Image (tube, rainbow, N blue to C red):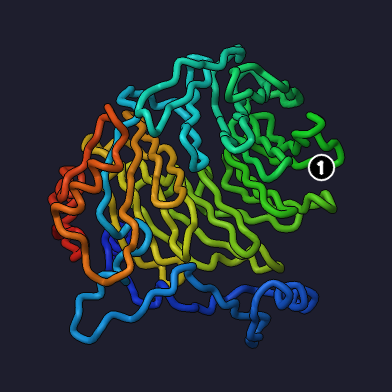
Amino acid sequence: MVENQAMIMQGSSTVCVSAPYSKVREVLVPVTENQKDVISEVRRVIHQPSGMCSVGVQHPLSLPTPASGQEPWRWRRGMCSVGHNILVLSNREDPARVVHFSGGQLVAVGSKDRLVRLLDVRAMRERSLAMQGHAGSVRAVHLCEDRGLVVSAGYDLSIRCWNLRTGACTMLLRGHFGTINCLDLHGNTLVSGAKDCRVKVWDLLTGRCHRRLRFRHDSPVQCVRVGLGLVLSSCDRGLLKLWDMEAGSLLKQIDTPQGSVKCLYLDQWHALSGGADGYVMAWSTRSDHAQSLMTYRHPREVLTLTFLFLRVITGCADGKIRVFDFLSGDCLRVIISNSQQSAVLSLHIHDNNIVINTSTSVMLFQFGRDGGGHSEPSEGERVDKAARDSPRGSEFRGYPYSPVRAQARRTDGLLQSEDVP
């Protein structure tokens, strides 16, 4: 009992950010004999015993080591570790809301009102254009702003593609026999998962479903992710399945102890799953290595997650965003997303911006950019820059020491040097 509480506390507290964050790190990746040649073509590999190899991974920013005796501010300014401003995009309470942000000017929003709406990040308002056509609630949206496209799906068993400029439905995809819960897109490959226990793969150029790719679960599909030739899916029962799209076969099946798996992440090397039991687990996509690589603990269920620069970033039902070191499992930062501590339903990270969808609001967190030197910008500089960068007429929440971060300190007793103005 005491040990379990200690584990939960470890997942709720923070540790100092490590300097090796911006250095080359060797990440162990399980491989088989026939996979070693494939890996060596992609990255520098040093072979290890017991079927393991280490892959060199480097942060895209090469930061110099701070001078002796100087506060290592640059090392502390990794993702989500600098000050941030908060812009409120929507104050409407809606636990059924789904959103997607692709890094541009718009945020796509769907809900029980059967409409797909657009929030303008720069103008800080909802656009008048609303896409109407679904006969039931919208359960999933995916925005491709660079292609002028938004994809939506939901209760009416249909997937609809919309023109962002005109709001017209340009394509209608049918084939599921249950409510569609999730969507993901990679290139022209669209993947959907539904309550009919099926995962379907679609070609957006032709609008056709790949019939030979028969991906199924024994219970309703909760989440899907698609990558280069791979599809990862999860279901209510906590089963993860990794599929090979080229061969149309099941590569790997993992029966997790997480219960219903709410969220997934997939890249070439790793998969991450977040469950109702409050655990995020890291897995290898290679070989038959079924054992979890790392576990990240939370006090309540995990509803959303992503993976960036060797950092696992999660959103929890307790209203907090946590940043974990992927290699050590340490919690590096805890951010309270809103003063009401409502559940974080989804988060979308692009550049220095995070769009956060909670059950009570949609917000944009704008994090500061690293400068050329080691010194932290002054209090006045931060406020002036925030005022210059904020859109005209926006509902701006920019303070040198924000109430949200102050609440985080009062609630969790967090006192980090990057939080001190």
Q: Quadrant of the C terminus?
A: bottom left
Q: Nearer the viewer, residue 59 or 138?
A: 59
Q: Residue 209: x and y, percent?
A: 80, 33
Q: Nearer the viewer, residue 26 or 121?
A: 121
**Residue 321 appears in view:** yes
Q: Quadrant of the N terminus?
A: bottom left
Q: Residue 61: x and y, percent?
A: 44, 69
Above or below, 188 relative to 45: above
Q: Quadrant of residue 268?
A: bottom right
The residue carrying mark 1 is: 213
Q: Quadrant of residue 418?
A: bottom left
Q: Residue at x 62, y 36 (%)?
A: 183
Q: Amino acid at mark 1?
A: Leu
**Circle 1: is it few (<14), some (14-19), or many (20+) Cα within 10 Å?**
some
Q: Residue 23: x and y, percent?
A: 44, 77
Q: Residue at x 49, y 78 (%)?
A: 24
Q: Residue 287: x and y, percent?
A: 71, 68
